[in-house]
Image: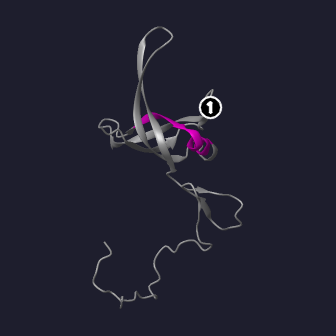
Amino acid sequence: MLNKIFIMGRLTRDPELRHTQTGASVASFTLAVDRDFKDKQTGERATDFIDCVIWRQTAEFVSRYFSKGRMAVVEGRLQIRDWTDKDGNKRRSAEVVADSVYFGDSKREGGSGGQESYSGGYGGYSAPAGGFPAQPDPDVPFADLTTDDGNLPF
């Protein structure tokens, strides 16, 4: 059996970090995920609001570095829960139990003295001081390989 899901969307609120009685960290958040198609009558894209939950060290990471409006990519599994509300009605809800959460955008960090610096993934990333060139330099020619033995590396 296979139960694997990948979703990408924006956080609708800051992640909520809680701890279980045994001390395990758990964070919950909701992603707003646009559908791939537009409504025929309105021309608007519908948005799904998907509840996500993540555990332990990754929950701590998400609660520290993600906030409302940030784009996130979530990898995990879909979980369906049956429960009874306070009026005795049977309810069913779906949520993504995340295994990994990645930055889906980049965030500029302030106070860099004119140097653009971005953070992404778990480690972080800094752009070169001059930034990346928009176009390759046409004055720098490509060189032919002279040591090609004809064998592919795979």
Name the image quarter holding residue 66: top right
Q: In the rendered view of the protein, which quadrant contains the N terminus?
A: top left
Which is nearer the eye, 68 or 79?
79
Q: Quadrant of the C terminus?
A: bottom left
Quarter occupied by residue 83: top left
Q: Does 125 sit above or below residue 73?
A: below
Rendered image quadrant of residue 46: top left
The residue most toward the front is: 22
What residue is drawn where x is 59% and y is 72%? 128
Q: Is residue 1 left or right of residue 123?
A: left
At 33% from the left and 41% from the top, the residue drawn is 38
Q: Give how far across and how far down residue 136 sits, in percent.
A: 45, 79
Residue that extends furthest to the left in the rendered view of this protein? 150
Give SS at disc 1.
Answer: strand
Residue positioned most to the bottom: 146
Task: Give the answer, above or below, for where 58 lies relative to 27.
Answer: below
Q: Position of residue 71 (x, y in %)?
A: 51, 47
Image location of residue 60, percent across then percent down: 61, 42
**Up-down relation of residue 25 to residue 149 (above or below):** above
Q: Label 1 crowding class (10 Å Cα cut-off): few <14, some 14-19, many 20+? A: some
| Disc 1 residue type (three-letter) | Arg
Residue identified by numbered label 1: 18
Q: Is residue 54 magenta?
A: yes
For the point 64% across and 44% down, which residue is it? 64
**Residue 149 rendering spot, x and y as whole percentages:** 30, 86
- Give the side of residue 124 with respect to residue 95, left or right: right
Q: Which residues are magenta?
A: 47-63
